[in-house]
Amino acid sequence: MARDFLRYLGITPQEVVGLGHALYALERLPKVTPGVYCQFGIFYRAGDKEFSEMKYITFAISDYSFEISIGGSVYEKGVGSDRYTEPGWLIELDEEGYRDPGCALYALEGKIREYIHLGAQITVDDQSAIDMSYEVVG
């Protein structure tokens, strides 16, 4: 998905660099990339004052974990709002940090493309301070 996000119009140079850092670290897996911290994904919001919904799918890679978070919220006037999360995916450096409670990885690409087609925004938050001179091993 990081590669696909690079194709969308409106992506800023800073977002391109952030996605580059994420791709670099992802290509090095299972090796750790010291100093990497990047989150990227989509954010979708639709509705009006009577009813609205928000949805997000976020990928986060750091020097100690890789995580996929999925969730959102629904608001209905007269009832209020409710937040929810869906099964995600997490792998951390220690062996205790593996969580795969049912996230359908094969379906994420289609979901993300659907939300982008509906007007979702691509988000990239890169706080990486990495030395990219490490050799990428194929």
Image (tube, rainbow, N blue to C red):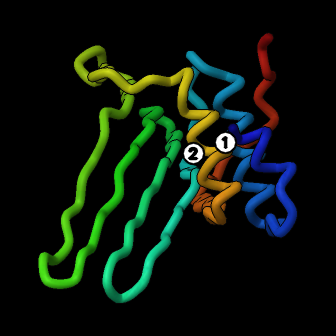
Provide residue 15's location: percent of width, then percent of height. Answer: 74, 61
Q: According to the image, label 2 marks what residue?
A: 35
Q: Residue at x 76, y 49 (%)?
A: 5
State the residue in front, 1 or 25: 1
**How far, Cα to Cα, is label 1 from label 2?**
11 Å
Mark 2 or mark 1, which is nearer the start of the sequence?
Answer: 1
Is the C terminus in the top left, top right, bottom left or bottom right quadrant?
A: top right
Q: According to the image, label 1 marks what residue?
A: 22
Say which amino acid is labelled 1.
Answer: Ala
Q: Residue at x 24, y 76 (%)?
A: 76
Q: Is residue 65 left or right of residue 11?
A: left
Which quadrant of the structure image shows residue 8? bottom right
Neighbor class of circle 2 (other Cα within 10 Å; few <14, some 14-19, many 20+) is some
Q: Residue furthest bottom?
A: 49
Provide residue 24's location: percent of width, then percent of height. Answer: 73, 34
Say which amino acid is labelled 2.
Answer: Gly
Q: Residue at x 61, y 20 (%)?
A: 29
